[in-house]
Amino acid sequence: MQATVWCWVLAIGLATAASARSIGPDGIERMYDSIAASDDWSSSASWQDRRVLHRYRPDPHDSRAVFHGIGHAAIANGTMTLNGSPRIYVASKEDHPWENVEITLYVRNGSGNATGPASVQSLLSGLSIVTRTNDKPSLQEPCNSYGYLMRYWLKTGDVGVQKQFWRDRTTGKTIYTLSSRNPIPIDARLLQDRFLGLKFIVQTLPDHETVHVRVYVDFTGGRDGGQWRLWQELLDVNWAAYPDSYDDLDAFPCTYDYTPHGREHSSSPVLARGSVTVIRADNVTDLQIKSVSIRNIAPASISGATAGDLLLQDTLFSIADLHSAVNPPIADLMGTSSSPDDRAARPVEVIVKQTTQHAKLVFHPDGGDKKRPQASSQRHQNPVHDKGTVMVTGKKDESSPSGKTQGPAVKNDQPRKQGRPTNVPNQARTDAKTNTKQTAATSKEGKPASTVHTSTGLY
């Protein structure tokens, strides 16, 4: 019998709490300071000189970056232009692997195309960042291919996250979770003339058994450091592998030494360090990236010292307020002895903000969309207040480039097996007008809940 999934997926569009802004050498805002500047990797240090990278060769100007995959990457004036399905493997410093990280980049769809070359793979066209992984091309051990992914799907305009457990280089088969994603309010073709900022933060919580994953977006192109807005947030307690991605539920192929006691390997958070972070494109034409940085930062904290810490406080206490949903106890996640049901006993530094500032929480049945009914709207008509996937809806984002609120992405993707995508028609994001009846999870302020998908998109 499958274990209960404890995976909290949270709001989009919420700004971080106010704090002093930290601007990096590339002019882009940082949520956290680096542990050691010497460990940082930045494109601004080596992407000025013109050159083209080809398969299985290191960058002659950057010994930490190695090109793999199919296609090529052209570098000039601080920008890398990707064609085909290239991968850039960025190595950590040998004695300081990638673990708690803040990764930032800007992406532009230079061709204006919403998909790549005409093939079933066009459903997967886009950009992925994979971190906490040891998926080196020189290694043939599939169980080293664990990691967290931030993904931008060109066809649907979604930005989201996914977790990978295992990948066989010979067959291309992958074991993964469902993806959790939200649409951005900009059509992929409109990104031909502007850069979209993406920021990916992965941190281990003080309990050393939970991982906090966030994605921020910036629609300003980096002006004045960017105006970063939380777009996707997830607490991974035991985010389970999608069953159809491997043959036998009783034969999960990997045993991880980092899996917490009493947890299943097939749902364990990725608590390992990674020797590489991978910048991966799939079936793209003139996809441009710039201002890329990868930095080791401190683990997640509830000290309140940074905007990110304050955001995590809100996340934890929003869940704690629901009592029955808190499993394991929220005090365990915080690393404190405070009772989640007694605010007076909580440490001063983690007192929650006013309740009115919290987003509305919506529950889905155990396992999220994994067993969703045909009518997507059914998911929102009968919320289950029990252990399961927790969605949070936020407030209307007045700074959205489209000036509109967006409904949850409702898709027709069907589960796929054996690592092969299903060629499903009508994948385009449902617009706000036709989506009216399917947004019961939307708060009265109008901001959508994030959506967990039976994704056709895999790492």
Image (cartoon, helix red, strand yellow):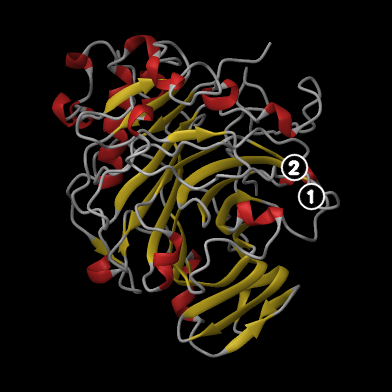
Q: Is residue 246 visible?
A: yes
Label number found at residue 419: 2
The residue nearer to you, when weighing 452 against 74, is 452
Crowd rating for badge 1 (residues with CA inside 10 Å; few <14, some 14–19, many 20+): few
Q: Quadrant of residue 438?
A: top left
Left or right side of 410 for 320: left
Which numbered disc, 2 or 1, marks the residue that appears first in the sequence? 1
| 185 shown above or below 222 | above
Residue 60, visible in the rendered structure: no
User: Label 1, on which residue?
Assistant: 172
Q: Label 2 sits on what residue type?
A: Gly
Name the residue: 17% across, 48% down: 18
Identify the residue at horizontal 84%, vertical 49% (top origin).
Answer: 171
Amino acid beneath label 1: Gly
Instruction: Point out which mark residue 213 bears.
Output: none
Q: CA distance from mark 2 to mark 1?
A: 7 Å
Residue 342 falls left or right of residue 5 = left
* Residue located 22% across and 24% down the image: 347
Q: Are marks 2 and 1 in contact (CB under 8 Å)?
A: yes
Q: Position of residue 301 (x, y in %)?
A: 34, 38
Going 33% across and 24% down the picture, which residue do you hit? 440
Q: Secondary structure at mark 2?
A: loop
> Badge 2: how crowded within 10 Å, few (<14), some, or many (20+)?
many
Instruction: Work out which residue is located at the far bottom of the displayed protein and give it.
Output: 50
Q: Is residue 347 above or below residue 411?
A: above
**203 or 127, which lies in front?**
127
Image coordinates of residue 16 in percent, x first then y, are: 24, 46
Q: What x and y, as percent, mark residue 9?
A: 42, 31
Q: Is residue 303 left or right of residue 273?
A: left
